[in-house]
Image (cartoon, rainbow, N blue to C red):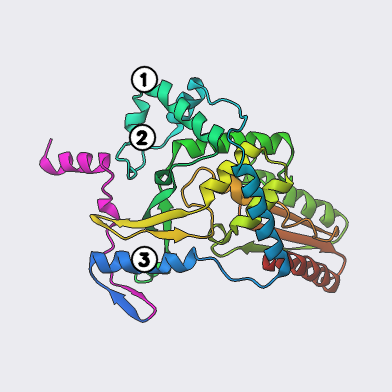
């Protein structure tokens, strides 16, 4: 094996992302960054703004904040929570589903986990079950190492054109399975949501749309469609708003307090090559790259189309929203669609 091939394998095992080098000078808020440390600091400044809590004046928001604080105070007085046990078989199945991503700050590669020993498969479930039982998450589990991937066909000089990805966590995957099972059993997700759900896909949404178009064509009606792609949707999730909705959904206490601990006091740092930024606090948004992220988001937005008028139809695939309607005339069609759009925008502004 040639030396370059050898080091390619070694670097891949250690998570060195040589193919993601930021060769361009970055510019943000009239400042330029040429060197690695400058680039890392610039990305940190940008993501601090993205994940900062936005001030609000609505009395409803303050009521929700107070309600969540009271619920946290009540649950923290409970010493232990009853929960379904994570078994060794469940752990092994989750480990096998892990991708061969780069290592986190613990330095343990997923390839190592997949070569688990009998001792590891015994101790890890005990550790994870203790976390659920006590409703406690170690601070190290809430520290995200963010790596950066440039969005296709975007300006490489602009930090806003890079998306953050934090590395996979085994415990989060197990909790996601529990929450997903509860959500499906209790029908918490609307039928129009097809994203990140078992046995659902974009095909379901397309068939729904095609069926409506065909039926209305037969009736000599016109159909029009409007599609929304919410900017930074995952990064804008309001923590207390999400917890409020999970509480209304009667999510079990052991899951609710675990998710609450998971979202609170989250820290992150930017990692690029051999340069790492200082940590910053993530005050909103679902953690990028977490197995829990998609499910928490679609639960948070499950009521986004409840108030859409009956004369319109809608579909969701994660944060992609489609609204369509049919009518005999273009004018009527325009009025119907505008009513639906106004209702959706009203929800987005809450």
As displayed, is residue 118 above or below residue 5?
above
Q: Residue at x 67, y 73 (%)?
A: 57
Locate the N terminus and report the quarter of the image it occupies.
Answer: top left
Residue at mark 1 to residue at mark 3: CA–CA distance: 40 Å
The answer to whether one can see residue 317 in this image is: no
Marking on residue 119: 1
Mark 1 vs mark 3, foreground winner is 1
Q: Residue at x 41, y 68 (%)?
A: 46
Indicate left or right for 102 with 334 as reference: left
- The reply to whether the magenta stretch includes residue 345 is no
Q: Alpha-carbon neighbours of circle 1 within 10 Å: few (<14), some, or many (≥20)? A: few
Residue to which mark 3 is pinned: 43
Q: Residue lying furthest front in this view?
A: 77
Residue 294, given in percent of the width and then of the height, sits at 57, 47
Q: Alpha-carbon neighbours of circle 2 within 10 Å: few (<14), some, or many (≥20)? A: many
The answer to whether one can see residue 91 in this image is: yes
Of the two numbered discs 1 and 3 on the same chain, state the one appearing first in sequence.
3
Q: Secondary structure at mark 3?
A: helix
Of the two numbered discs 2 and 3 on the same chain, state the one appearing first in sequence.
3
Residue to which mark 2 is pinned: 110
Q: Which residues are magenta?
A: 1-29
Residue 133, given in percent of the width and then of the height, sits at 55, 32
Residue 344, given in percent of the width and then of the height, sits at 73, 64
200 or 269, nearer to the observer: 269
Of the two numbered discs 2 and 1 on the same chain, state the one appearing first in sequence.
2
């Amino acid at each position: 094996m040639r030396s370059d091939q050898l080091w390619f394998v070694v670097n891949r095992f250690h998570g060195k992302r040589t193919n993601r080098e930021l060769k361009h000078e970055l510019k943000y808020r009239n400042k330029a960054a040429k060197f690695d440390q400058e680039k890392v600091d610039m990305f940190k400044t940008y993501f601090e703004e993205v994940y900062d809590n936005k001030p609000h004046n609505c009395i409803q928001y303050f009521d929700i904040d107070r309600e969540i604080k009271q619920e946290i105070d009540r649950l923290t007085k409970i010493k232990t929570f009853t929960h379904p046990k994570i078994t060794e078989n469940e752990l092994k199945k989750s480990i096998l589903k892990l991708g061969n991503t780069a290592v986190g700050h613990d330095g343990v590669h997923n390839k190592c986990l997949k070569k688990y020993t009998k001792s590891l498969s015994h101790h890890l479930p005990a550790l994870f079950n203790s976390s659920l039982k006590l409703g406690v998450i170690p601070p190290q589990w809430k520290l995200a190492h963010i790596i950066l991937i440039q969005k296709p066909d975007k300006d490489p000089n602009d930090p806003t054109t890079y998306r953050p990805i934090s590395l996979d966590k085994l415990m989060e995957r197990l909790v996601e399975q529990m929450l997903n099972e509860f959500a499906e059993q209790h029908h918490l997700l609307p039928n129009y949501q097809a994203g990140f759900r078992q046995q659902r896909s974009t095909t379901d949404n397309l068939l729904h749309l095609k069926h409506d178009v065909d039926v209305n064509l037969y009736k000599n009606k016109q159909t029009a469609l409007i599609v929304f792609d919410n900017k930074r949707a995952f990064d804008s999730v309001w923590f207390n708003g999400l917890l409020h909705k999970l509480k209304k959904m009667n999510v079990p206490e052991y899951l609710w307090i675990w998710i609450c601990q998971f979202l609170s006091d989250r820290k992150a740092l930017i990692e690029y090559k051999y340069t790492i930024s200082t940590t910053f606090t993530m005050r909103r948004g679902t953690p990028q790259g977490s197995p829990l992220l998609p499910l928490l988001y679609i639960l948070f937005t499950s009521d986004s189309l409840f108030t859409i008028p009956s004369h319109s139809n809608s579909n969701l695939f994660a944060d992609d929203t489609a609204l369509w309607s049919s009518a005999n005339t273009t004018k009527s069609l325009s009025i119907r669609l505008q009513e639906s759009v106004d209702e959706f925008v009203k929800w987005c502004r809450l």
